[in-house]
Image (spheres, helix red, strand yellow):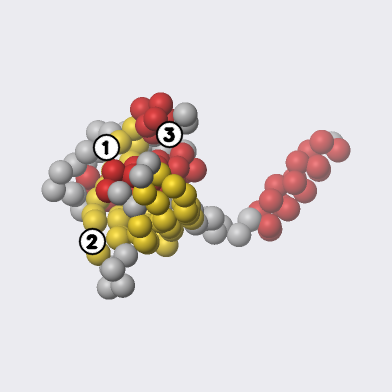
């Protein structure tokens, strides 16, 4: 009986304290990379159930290092969400010159993109969290 009452109190407290708000992801880098300097900021500005909108500020850095920084940020968001696959749905330049990305997250790489996300990129290519872990966990 005491265990049941404790469980009920724990559940009620959990419901009362749950805010429902997701922690938005932010990653910054400011370090020497090879022959140059990489200075970037990646910020998740919208967190929907199946996708995120990401804003990237690129101050300096080579194209390869910059691309790797962006993909790693997307990979880390997928890991936080607990989804094994992600896909770049849309890419554009914001009015302030920042790079903008809409990234979809799924539990399968065999989803119907238009019905699942409401849109489909020109080149649909899912990336695997597990496969990228071999690169980013070094």
Of the pair 18 and 124, the residue shown nearer to us = 124
Q: Is residue 37 above or below residue 76?
A: below
- Judging by the rendered image, the residue that carries numbered circle 1 is 126
The residue at 43%/34% (across/down) is: 136
Q: Nearer the viewer, mark 3 or mark 1?
A: 3
How much space separates mark 1 and mark 2, taking CA atoms? 19 Å
The residue at 30%/60% (across/down) is: 100
Q: Nearer the viewer, mark 2 or mark 3?
A: 3
Q: Nearer the viewer, mark 1 or mark 2?
A: 2
Mark sitting earlier along the chain (2/3): 2
Q: Secondary structure at mark 1?
A: loop
Residue 75 shown left or right of residue 2 in the figure: left
Q: Position of residue 104 (x, y in %)?
A: 32, 47
**Which numbered circle lies on residue 92?**
2
Mark yes or no: residue 34 visible: yes
Residue 41 shown left or right of residue 6 in the figure: left
Residue 37 shown left or right of residue 98 in the figure: right
- Judging by the rendered image, the residue that carries numbered circle 3 is 136
Q: Position of residue 54 (x, y in %)?
A: 37, 57
Q: Neighbour class for label 1 at 10 Å: few (<14), some, many (≥20)? A: some
Q: Residue furthest front?
A: 35
The residue at 46%/39% (across/down) is: 79
Q: Residue furthest bottom?
A: 95
């Amino acid at each position: 009986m005491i265990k049941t009452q404790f469980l009920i109190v724990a559940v009620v407290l959990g419901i009362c304290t749950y805010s429902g708000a997701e922690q938005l992801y932010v990653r910054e880098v400011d370090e020497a990379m090879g022959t140059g300097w990489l200075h970037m900021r990646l910020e998740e500005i919208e967190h929907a159930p199946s996708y995120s909108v990401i804003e990237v500020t690129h101050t300096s850095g080579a194209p390869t290092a910059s691309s790797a920084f962006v993909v790693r940020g997307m990979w880390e968001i997928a890991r936080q969400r607990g989804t094994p696959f992600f896909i770049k749905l849309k890419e554009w330049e914001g009015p302030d010159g920042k790079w903008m990305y809409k990234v979809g997250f799924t539990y399968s790489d065999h989803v119907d993109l238009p019905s699942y996300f409401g849109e489909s990129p020109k080149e649909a290519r899912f990336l695997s969290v597990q496969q990228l872990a071999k690169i980013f966990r070094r």
